[in-house]
Image: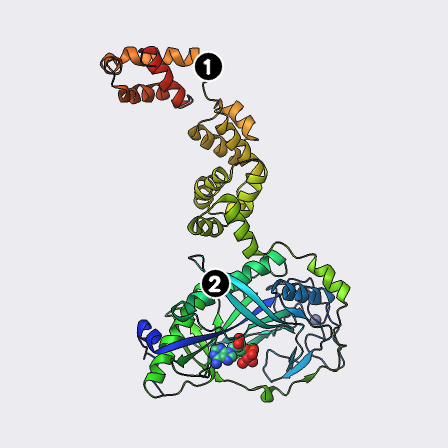
Amino acid sequence: MTAVADLMDYDEVLERFDPVLGLEVHVELNTNTKMFCGCANLFGGEPNTHVCPTCLGLPGSLPVVNGKAVESAIRIGLALNCEIAPWCRFARKNYFYPDMPKNFQTSQYDEPIAFNGYLDVTLDDGEVVRVEIERAHMEEDTGKSLHVGGATGRIHGAEHSLLDYNRAGVPLIEIVTKPITGTGARAPEVARAYVSALRDLLLALGVSDVRMDQGSLRCDANVSLMTKDATEFGTRTETKNVNSLRSVERAVRYEMTRQAAVLADGGKVTQETRHFQEADGTTSPGRTKETAEDYRYFPEPDLVPIAPPAEWVGQLRGTLPEMPAARRQRIQTEWGLTAEELRDLFNSGAVDRVEATVAAGAKPGDARGWWINFLAQEANSREVELTALPITPGQVARVIELVSTGELTNKLAREVVKGVLAGEGEPDEVVEKRGLKVVSDDSALLAAVDEALAAQPDIADKIRGGKVQAAGAIVGSVMKATKGQADAKRVRELILERVGQG
Ligand code: ADP
Ligand code: MG
Ligand code: ZN
């Protein structure tokens, strides 16, 4: 065995090898009930409170397929550009594990409900990589074990284990890519971007809450290396427990540098599952991988085949929302954004709000500016999500309108937004109550201008003498005198008029 810490420098890995990836993503559906019984499908809860004879695998109990889960599976398949099987079955995947009370998992094997699709993934610099999808199949989640008394939380060294079957039988869709080749140095980034794009897609479909931190979206990353002259794929490892986007990227990169060191040393990569350690970004061996024969798959005799009528599939196709990649493309073109601006917009989490603000009449640039700058800061200082701020896109659009008509300056507009956030009412009410309207009455402004000119006669003389840039100081005084409620541009015009330079 090679020492765990033997890693090859990343650049050298790329000179000598080509990485091949395979990503398996499990997503828990947000149906009301479990896959094959009527138990509530809820995260957490008192252990073993969402259970019944069926999801506990008690003898004599019989499963019934959750129609809503099949619907979600088909919609996911369609969104991933897959073919939908006109007829398919569930299969029993036999294995013994304490969190699998039936001693088999009801899954799909060689008859997945969806197959042969693709997902276009946009990388940070705007490059698009097409990831081919092998299949998306339906299955059920397992229960959870809690190993107590050991140092690591693993079964080794534990004093006893506790089992919670609340999650047993929760509907899962497993989405498996075809081998992803040709990504070279960008393999880790492609892996992260794929999971991220898939997460956005599932969110847009509304089929799951896709919380990687709660395990409702989980990714296993298969990685292997090929030497430059190889004609066949190398042996892969499958890293489990990768529960954040960043970890997906780190795990792939780590495996590339680890496997390269093993191979360069004349060793062989063992086909095995590995565990990812968040703490140091390494992977460690799990179990050597079972083969299909080990699972003794056979068609599930207790469930009827799934045969979705073509009309139903057609109807479901009609329910697909605008896909995230298409939406990005559309927004970028419509609003004329650079790749970087687009990325910032999407990273801000405010896209929906910005779009709604534009729909309410604001210019895209103004709407973006308010949400990703001022309002993002407000959300940050209140430690809430941007979307939880108590202001609507319509209200933001109104503030923007008041600025564009000259009724508010930017500074006053920020005051108005603060007022709305403080619950003082609609923007117009806040303007009224706080007395924030721009002083647009020329006679009031002129009085302030005259006062400022009289107070600073030497500056007034300079302007008179042609140094018009000196007007800035007078503008400042007038703004101060009017508590920032004057339109600086108009003030400047009036000053120049007054000294005969207008
Ligand atoms: P398993 O039952 O072992 O989980 P799956 O077929 O469900 O196997 O998933 C294996 C994943 O690994 C797929 O995404 C597949 O495309 C990918 N894959 C297969 N062979 C290789 C390889 N040599 N290197 C990297 N990925 C691979
Ligand atoms: Mg698999
Ligand atoms: Zn149940």
Instruction: Please tell me in which quadrant of the rendered image residue 35 appears.
Output: bottom right
Residue located beneath label 2 in the image: 193
Q: Residue at x 31, y 11 (%)?
A: 499
Q: Secondary structure at mark 2?
A: helix
Q: Quadrant of the C terminus?
A: top left
Identity of the amino acid at label 1?
Asp
State the SS at label 1: loop
The picture places residue 186, in percent across and down from the top left corner, at 41, 67
Q: CA distance from mark 1 to mark 2?
A: 55 Å
Tell me residue 80's x, y (percent). Answer: 60, 65
Instruction: Name the foreground residue: 430 vs 51.
Output: 430
Numbered mark located on residue 441 in the image? 1
- Can residue 421 be seen from the camera position used here? yes
Query: Residue 144: x, y in percent?
Result: 57, 73
Q: Which image quadrant is residue 205 in?
A: bottom right
Q: 500 or 454: nearer the eye?
A: 500
